[in-house]
Image: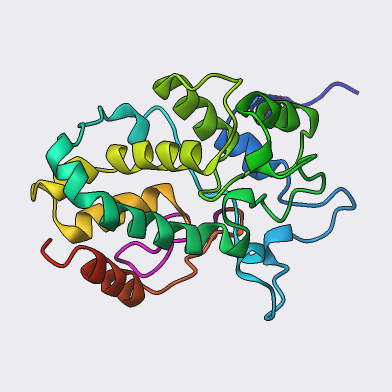
Amino acid sequence: GDLTPGATRMVIRIAIAFLFLCRADGVMAEQLAFLFDRQGGPPMFEQRAPGDALERQQTASLFSGPNGLFAKPVRSVPAPALARARAPVAQLRDLIARAEAGPKGYDAVQHGARIKTPKPPTAMTVGEVFAWIKATPGQPHAIGRYQFIPSTLRHLVKELGVPKSAQFTPTVQDRLADHLLAQAGLGEFLAGEMGRVPFMNAIARVWAGLPNSSGKSHYHGYAGNKAVISWAAFEAEMVRIFPSSG
């Protein structure tokens, strides 16, 4: 028989929600598509054996959006300050990589990806990375030492003018990560205009493996995300890396 007005409204809501999920780009599409496996099992990200390697504990953790970090103009770091900070910034990248990629580093691919890259990411071009993403829908695609998800990678490649023919080398990956750090306030932090805690919280908005000052990931529980180190350990490392910054 005919649907009641209430049932009609419910059908419309379900249809709208379905279309939203189908059309969602970036974070929502990447995360929601693989919350459940194709057999209808439990969320993949909760299946974590105690002995798993660090990279098997990671989830895609770079997030962007119209009101996120990417809406903020990047303050360039003056060359002298950047030269002085080159070693500490490299150590900060190491810290982020330990929380995100684990031992595979620059060749890490998100553990939930059923279809891995055809060759190590560092042996691929940026165009080949995007081709792999397009050819393997419905699975996570976080890739590289800093676990870039597609929406973030697309943004960075466009913003920095990285050609699709460029190889996805450690140098390229570090450059992309440095741009994310700049968007999180690296320039202000090095200039003493941003405190250590606000900068740490900003970094935690980018990489979900790091905790914010609450002690949890900024994305705790979202698609299984959680911080893999404590706030105390994160802060101790930041004090060691940047001893003169308050």
Q: Is residue 192 above or below residue 187?
A: below
Image quadrant in which you'd find residue 118: top right
Residue displayed at 32% across by 44% down: 181
Q: Is residue 65 above or below residue 215?
A: above
Farthest bottom residue in view: 50
Part of the protein shown in magenta:
209-222
Residue 244 lies, in percent from the top left, at 10, 64
Residue 63 lies, in percent from the top left, at 47, 41
Confirm whether the magenta stretch covers residue 211.
yes
Q: Is residue 15 above or below residue 231?
A: above
Residue 141, can we see it? no
Residue 170, can we see it? yes
Residue displayed at 64% across by 52% down: 108
In the image, 98: left or right of 142? left
Residue 70 lies, in percent from the top left, at 36, 31
Q: Is residue 63 above or below residue 53?
A: above
Residue displayed at 49% across by 22% down: 162
